[in-house]
C-alpha cells in the first residue's frame, strides 16, 4: 500500500511517501511560502535524488497538486500515476475530546475537526485545508486523520482537570490535552523494541525536546500524564515558550505594562523560554556554545531548561510508581549530550545512570546510553511521526477493504 | 500618518504593500515611522525581530504612483481637503489598471464627489481607518452612491484580512465614529468653558462613569484640537445644524497653538516632546 503523509501548516505543506508493509519512505519534502511570493518545493527521493523548484502556489490545494506532480514526474518521481496513491494520512493538531484515535475522514469527522478550531486556531484550519485539497485532487482515495492529542486520551481525570472552577471545563473544554502524541507513542514503542521487552510491562518517561518540548509518562503502553496542557505552552522550557510559571505573573505584568491579551500571548509564546532568559537565541546549539564560552545568561538558560526536565522525571516516576526507561527524542534530545547529562544529574537514587563516554559521542542516532550499573535504561531515539501516521493509515484503510465476511456480521 | 499606519498593518497581515508619496523625504519618514512603530511592538512583546524583518520586506516604496499599476487596491490617504482628494483620484485613474479598486480614507468628505472624478465610480469605496491604525481595530467601510456590491465586498475582505472589525456605513458626513465622538468632545469643551468642572474632573467623570479608556479632553489632545475643529466645521457645513458649532474655547486654544499632544500642550501639558503622560 502506498501512503502519502501530509502535514499542512499555515504557509507550508510537508509530505512523506511510504510503502507498506515494508514501511519504507520512498520520498519526502515540503512546499514552502504558500500564498507568498517565491514559493518553493523541496523534494528528496530515497535514493538521494534531490530537487528544489520554484512553484506558483497560492493555496494548499495548489501546493498538494505540486507535490503530486513531483511524485509522478519521470525525472524525480517514484510513481507513474496519481492513481498509485492508495491513501493519505494527515497530521492533525487537535482532536479535542471527541477524536481520541486515528480515524477515516468522513464528513462527520471533518465537522468534528472543524469544531476543534477554537482549541487550535493556529493549526487545525490549515490541517483542514490539506484534507479538503486532497479530497479535491484525489477523489475516492481514503484519507485518515491522525491527531497530535490522541495518544494522551488515556490520561486519567485527576491528571487532566485543572484546579479551576469546574464550570470552565464544561463550558470551554478547558483541560490538559497534551501534544506530540505520535512522537511519544513512537519512541516508547521503539524503546521497548530496543530493550527487548513488551511495552505493556514498562514504565517509560519520554522527553521530546525540540522547538516545542514535552514529556510524557507512559505506563503499560498508555500515556498517563504529559507536560503540555490546554495549549503547547505548559510544561518544559522551550525555544521561545515559557512552560510552567505562576499564572499570577501574567496578570501582574499585564497590569504593570498595560499589555493586551495578544501582547501577553506573544510575550509568553515568542519572547520567553531560552530566548527570553538568555537574550541571545532560541536555538539550543547557540545557547550551548555561548554557555561554554562563559556567557552567564546562556548558562542559566541551559540550567533552567535541564532542571525542568529533571523535575518532571521525578514527578513522572512518582506518578507511575517507578520508571524503567527514560527516552530522549526531538532535535535537542538526540543531538545534545549536555542537555541529557544535565537533565539526569543526581538521579542515581532513582537508579538512572548515564554512560558518559557513550553519551558524549552520541548524536543523531538511536542509541542506548545506559551505564552498566544503571537499573533504568536511558535511550536516545530518532522520532518518526510520519511513520506512525502511515501505519495508522494503513491499518484503518486495510480494515475497510476486508472481505465481505466482515459486512455480514 | 494614516497611510503609514495602513501600510504597517497591511504588511503585518501578510499583504504586499507599495507605499507611495510625491516627496522622497516624506516617504523615508513614513518608512522610519513604521520601523519605529515595529520596534515599539517588539519592546511590547507583540512581535519578534524576525517578524519585523518579514513585515518590512513586504513594503516597497516608490516616489509618485507611476510604478504601482498592478495593485488590487489603491488607497488614497492625503489630507482631508476635497481638492487634494479629487486630484489624487484623477492621477489614480491614469496610473492604475481598470480592475484596481480605489479607496479613500476620508472621514467627512463626500466619496460620491471624489468618485465622480473617475470613470469607475462603481469601483470606488471609502475605508475610514482610525488613528493610530495598528491600535484601532475598526474600519468604517463606506458605500458611496455608485459603489458596486462587489467593490464593497472586496473592501470588507481587505479590512478583515487586516484583522479589523468592519462596520458598514452609508455615505453621510462623519459616518458613525466622527459623527458621534467629535460633538462629544465639543460638548466637553463647552462644559469646561462654562465652568461646570475641571479638566481632570470632566475626564474622570466620563472615564469611570461610562468605562471610556480615556476622557474626552485627553482624547481631544491626542486627536489634535485643530483636527477636532476642522471635523466639526466639516459637519457644520454639510449638515447646517447649529449643534455642530465648534466651541469657542477650542478656537481660542488653536489660535494659541495649544493643539494637544503634538505641540506639547492642549488641555494637558506634555513635557517630553508631546509623548508624556498628562
Image: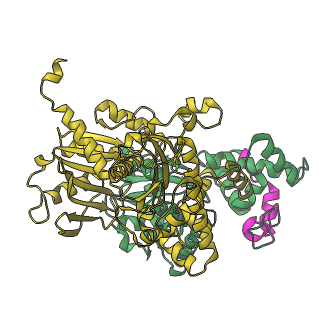
Chain colours: A yellow, B green
Compared with residue A300, is residue B133 higher up or lower down, i.e. above or below?
Answer: above
Q: Residue at x 60, y 72 (%)?
A: A299
Is B207 or B27 nearer to us in this picture? B207
Q: Magenta stretch?
A: B243-271
Residue A278 in the image: state x and y as whole percent. Answer: 60, 70
Q: Residue at x 53, y 54 (%)?
A: A351
Is A229 within the magenta?
no
Where residue B243 sits, quadrant-wise, is top right
Quarter of the figure with the C terminus of chain A: top left
Is B250 within the magenta?
yes
Q: Residue at x 63, y 69 (%)?
A: A300
Residue B176 in the image: state x and y as whole percent. Answer: 60, 44
Is B96 or B276 nearer to us in this picture? B276
Where residue B234 sits, quadrant-wise, is bottom right
Is A292 or A86 nearer to us in this picture? A292
Residue B195 visible: yes
Residue B85 visible: no
Amino acid at each position: 500500500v502506498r501512503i502519502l503523509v501530509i502535514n499542512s501548516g499555515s504557509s507550508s505543506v510537508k509530505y512523506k511517501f511510504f510503502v507498506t508493509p515494508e514501511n519504507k519512505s520512498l520520498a519526502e519534502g515540503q512546499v514552502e511560502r504558500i500564498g507568498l511570493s517565491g514559493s518553493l518545493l523541496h523534494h528528496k527521493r530515497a535514493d538521494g535524488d534531490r530537487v528544489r523548484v520554484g512553484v506558483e502556489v497560492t493555496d494548499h490545494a495548489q501546493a498538494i497538486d505540486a507535490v503530486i506532480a513531483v511524485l509522478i514526474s519521470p525525472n524525480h518521481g517514484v510513481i507513474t500515476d496519481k492513481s498509485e496513491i492508495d491513501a493519505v494520512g494527515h497530521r492533525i493538531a487537535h482532536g479535542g475530546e471527541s477524536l481520541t484515535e486515528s480515524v477515516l475522514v468522513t464528513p462527520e469527522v471533518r465537522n468534528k475537526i472543524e469544531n476543534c478550531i477554537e482549541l487550535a486556531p493556529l493549526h487545525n484550519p490549515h490541517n483542514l485545508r490539506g484534507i479538503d485539497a486532497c479530497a479535491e485532487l484525489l477523489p475516492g482515495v481514503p484519507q485518515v486523520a491522525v491527531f497530535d492529542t490522541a495518544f494522551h486520551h488515556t490520561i486519567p481525570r485527576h491528571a487532566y482537570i485543572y484546579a479551576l472552577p469546574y464550570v470552565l471545563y464544561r463550558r470551554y473544554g478547558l483541560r490538559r490535552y497534551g501534544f506530540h502524541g505520535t512522537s511519544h507513542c513512537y519512541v516508547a514503542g521503539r524503546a521497548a523494541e530496543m530493550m527487548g521487552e513488551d511495552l505493556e510491562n514498562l514504565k517509560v518517561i519520554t522527553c521530546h525536546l525540540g522547538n516545542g518540548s514535552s514529556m510524557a509518562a507512559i505506563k503499560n503502553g498508555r500515556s498517563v500524564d504529559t507536560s503540555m496542557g490546554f495549549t503547547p505552552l505548559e510544561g518544559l522550557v522551550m525555544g521561545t515558550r515559557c512552560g510552567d510559571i505562576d499564572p499570577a505573573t501574567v496578570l501582574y505584568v499585564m497590569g504593570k505594562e498595560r499589555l493586551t491579551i495578544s501582547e501577553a500571548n506573544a510575550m509568553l509564546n515568542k519572547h520567553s523560554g531560552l530566548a527570553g532568559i538568555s537574550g541571545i537565541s532560541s536555538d539550543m546549539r547557540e545557547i550551548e556554545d555561548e554557555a561554554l564560552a562563559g556567557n552567564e545568561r546562556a548558562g542559566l538558560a541551559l540550567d533552567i531548561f535541564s532542571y525542568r526536565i529533571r523535575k518532571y522525571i521525578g514527578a513522572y516516576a512518582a506518578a507511575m510508581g517507578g520508571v524503567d526507561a527514560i527516552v530522549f527524542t526531538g532535535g535537542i534530545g538526540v543531538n545534545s549530550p549536555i542537555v541529557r547529562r544535565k537533565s539526569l544529574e543526581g538521579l542515581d537514587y532513582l537508579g538512572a545512570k548515564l554512560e558518559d563516554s557513550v553519551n558524549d559521542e552520541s548524536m543523531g542516532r538511536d542509541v542506548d546510553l545506559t551505564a552498566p550499573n544503571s537499573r533504568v535504561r536511558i535511550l536516545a531515539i530518532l522520532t518518526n511521526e510520519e511513520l506512525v501516521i502511515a501505519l495508522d493509515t494503513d491499518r484503518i484503510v486495510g480494515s475497510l477493504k476486508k472481505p465481505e465476511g466482515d459486512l455480514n456480521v | 500618518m494614516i497611510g503609514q499606519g495602513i501600510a504597517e498593518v497591511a504588511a503585518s497581515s501578510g499583504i504586499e504593500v507599495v507605499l507611495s508619496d510625491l516627496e522622497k523625504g516624506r516617504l523615508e519618514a513614513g518608512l522610519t515611522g513604521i520601523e519605529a512603530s515595529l520596534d515599539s511592538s517588539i519592546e511590547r512583546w507583540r512581535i519578534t525581530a524576525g517578524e519585523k524583518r518579514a513585515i518590512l520586506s513586504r513594503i516597497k516604496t516608490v516616489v509618485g504612483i507611476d510604478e504601482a499599476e498592478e495593485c488590487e487596491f489603491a488607497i488614497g490617504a492625503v489630507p482631508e481637503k476635497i481638492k487634494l482628494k479629487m486630484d489624487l483620484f484623477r492621477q489614480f485613474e491614469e496610473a492604475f489598471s481598470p480592475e484596481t479598486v480605489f479607496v479613500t480614507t476620508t472621514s467627512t468628505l463626500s466619496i460620491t464627489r471624489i468618485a465622480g472624478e473617475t470613470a469607475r465610480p462603481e469601483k470606488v469605496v471609502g475605508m475610514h481607518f482610525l488613528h493610530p491604525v495598528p491600535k484601532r481595530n475598526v474600519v468604517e467601510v463606506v458605500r458611496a452612491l455608485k459603489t458596486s456590491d462587489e467593490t464593497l465586498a472586496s473592501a470588507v475582505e481587505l479590512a478583515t484580512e487586516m484583522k479589523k472589525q468592519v462596520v458598514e456605513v452609508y455615505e453621510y458626513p462623519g459616518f458613525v465614529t466622527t459623527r458621534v465622538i467629535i460633538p462629544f468632545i465639543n460638548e466637553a469643551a463647552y462644559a469646561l468653558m462654562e465652568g461646570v468642572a475641571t479638566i481632570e474632573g470632566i475626564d474622570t467623570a466620563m472615564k469611570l462613569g461610562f468605562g471610556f479608556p480615556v476622557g474626552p479632553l485627553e482624547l481631544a489632545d491626542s486627536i489634535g484640537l485643530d483636527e477636532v475643529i476642522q471635523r466639526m466645521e466639516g459637519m457644520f457645513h454639510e449638515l447646517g445644524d447649529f449643534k455642530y458649532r465648534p466651541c469657542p474655547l477650542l478656537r481660542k486654544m488653536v489660535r494659541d497653538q495649544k493643539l494637544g499632544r503634538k505641540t506639547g500642550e492642549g488641555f494637558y501639558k506634555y513635557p517630553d516632546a508631546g509623548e508624556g503622560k498628562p
